Image (cartoon, helix red, strand yellow):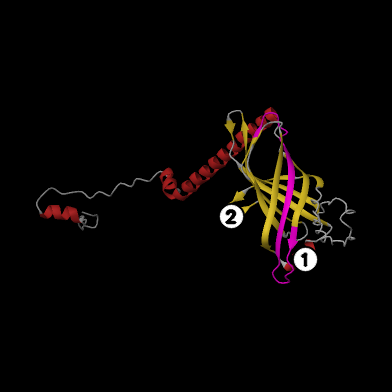
């Protein structure tokens, strides 16, 4: 009972207990338990922890890549110090135009030709052996890249310190060419400036270890070859003087057909460039 004479109100639970005749029940407030500050950080910092883990993964990936690059650089340096590798050297020594014929059509001219070339390939290394696949040989004019035909050379094993002579024939039969560029580049007399390309795949062998073959291109430019001379006209038969049977000399065989001399070979001695051809999907560099 309060000081003013009025009874104190009881909680509902206590009142219900008194109505049932049981002992009175005291109302207790729930105990407040404050959460530790660390729990809030853990619940609210899920995004930050995820970002932190992604950063860690990226950092370790970059670290692994740098480590692999360092190991490759060390291995390459050790290989260079041990073997002193050098690229193979190709030199074009002789080129000869055996046949060259351009049709006189003003709209769709065709080209028929045959060009013999001789190259020397040198392996300057003392311990490295080069393994070549078949070569695809093409030729074109230097000014406007008018195609002059194609050929092939079988592959070979290029031993250390070896010099190999390569002979190839580039030819074309009724090859369609552009009328404007062909008329200016291909001359019936005088010198013609051409380029020569040999493409193949090459690998390296060191002892019992073989590397994967990669594409290479041997490019020779600045080649000047002489166009073949036109065949001479047929010789005319001279009328002889009639002689009697007694005074006639012994018959001599006369060959009225003039045999054209072979076209002269052009000594070129041009050092060719060796380029590495890297193919990435559809592009070749």
Label count reads 2
Q: Residues within 10 Å of mark 2 (few under 14, many from 20)?
A: few
As for residue 121 lying within the magenta part, the answer is yes
In the image shown, does 103 or 120 lie closer to the viewer? Answer: 103
Q: Is residue 29 left or right of residue 181?
A: left
Quadrant of res 237: bottom right
Please, is residue 236 above or below residue 223 in the view? below
Quadrant of res 233: bottom right
In the image shown, does 7 or 127 lie closer to the viewer? Answer: 127
**Farthest residue in the bottom direction?**
107
Q: Residue at x 79, y 64 (%)?
A: 184
Q: Which mark is nearer the camera, 2 or 1? A: 1
Residue 150 screen position, x and y as percent: 67, 53
In the image shown, does 65 or 261 lie closer to the viewer? Answer: 261
Please, is residue 34 above or below residue 173 in the view? above
Please, is residue 93 above or below residue 10 in the view? above
Disc 2 to disc 1, C-alpha distance: 34 Å
Q: Where are the magenta residues, as a range?
A: 100-129
Q: Is residue 127 left or right of residue 4?
A: right
Query: According to the image, label 2 marks what residue?
Result: 282
SS class, disc 2: loop
As for residue 123 lying within the magenta part, the answer is yes
Please, is residue 125 above or below residue 154 in the view? above
SS class, disc 1: helix
Q: Residue at x 88, y 52 (%)?
A: 249
Query: According to the image, label 1 marks what residue?
Result: 183
Quadrant of res 204: top right
Q: Residue at x 81, y 46 (%)?
A: 268
In the image shown, does 71 or 229 lie closer to the viewer? Answer: 229
Residue 220 screen position, x and y as percent: 75, 48
């Amino acid at each position: 009972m309060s000081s003013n004479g009025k009874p104190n109100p009881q909680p509902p639970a206590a009142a219900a207990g008194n109505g049932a005749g049981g002992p009175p029940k005291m109302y207790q407030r729930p105990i407040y338990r404050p959460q530790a500050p660390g729990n809030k950080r853990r619940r609210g910092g899920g995004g930050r922890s995820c970002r932190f883990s992604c950063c860690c993964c990226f950092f370790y990936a970059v670290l692994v890549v740098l480590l692999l690059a360092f190991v490759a650089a060390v291995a390459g340096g050790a290989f260079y110090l041990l073997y002193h590798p050098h690229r193979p050297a190709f030199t074009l020594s002789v080129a000869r135009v055996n046949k060259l014929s351009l049709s006189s059509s003003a709209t769709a001219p065709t080209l028929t030709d045959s060009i013999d070339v001789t190259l020397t390939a040198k392996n300057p290394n003392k311990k490295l052996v080069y393994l070549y696949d078949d070569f695809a040989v093409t030729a074109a004019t230097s000014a406007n890249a008018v195609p002059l035909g194609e050929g092939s050379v079988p592959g070979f094993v290029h031993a250390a310190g070896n010099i190999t002579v390569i002979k190839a024939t580039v030819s074309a039969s009724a090859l369609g060419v552009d009328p404007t560029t062909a008329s200016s580049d291909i001359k019936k007399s005088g010198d013609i400036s051409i380029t020569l390309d040999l493409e193949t795949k090459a690998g390296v062998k060191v002892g019992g270890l073989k590397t994967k073959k990669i594409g290479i291109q041997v490019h020779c430019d600045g080649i000047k070859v002489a166009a073949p001379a036109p065949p001479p006209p047929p010789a005319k038969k001279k009328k002889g003087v009639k002689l009697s049977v007694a005074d006639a000399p012994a018959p001599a065989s006369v060959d009225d057909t003039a045999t054209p001399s072979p076209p002269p070979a052009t000594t070129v001695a041009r050092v060719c460039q060796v380029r590495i051809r890297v193919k990435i999907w559809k592009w070749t560099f």
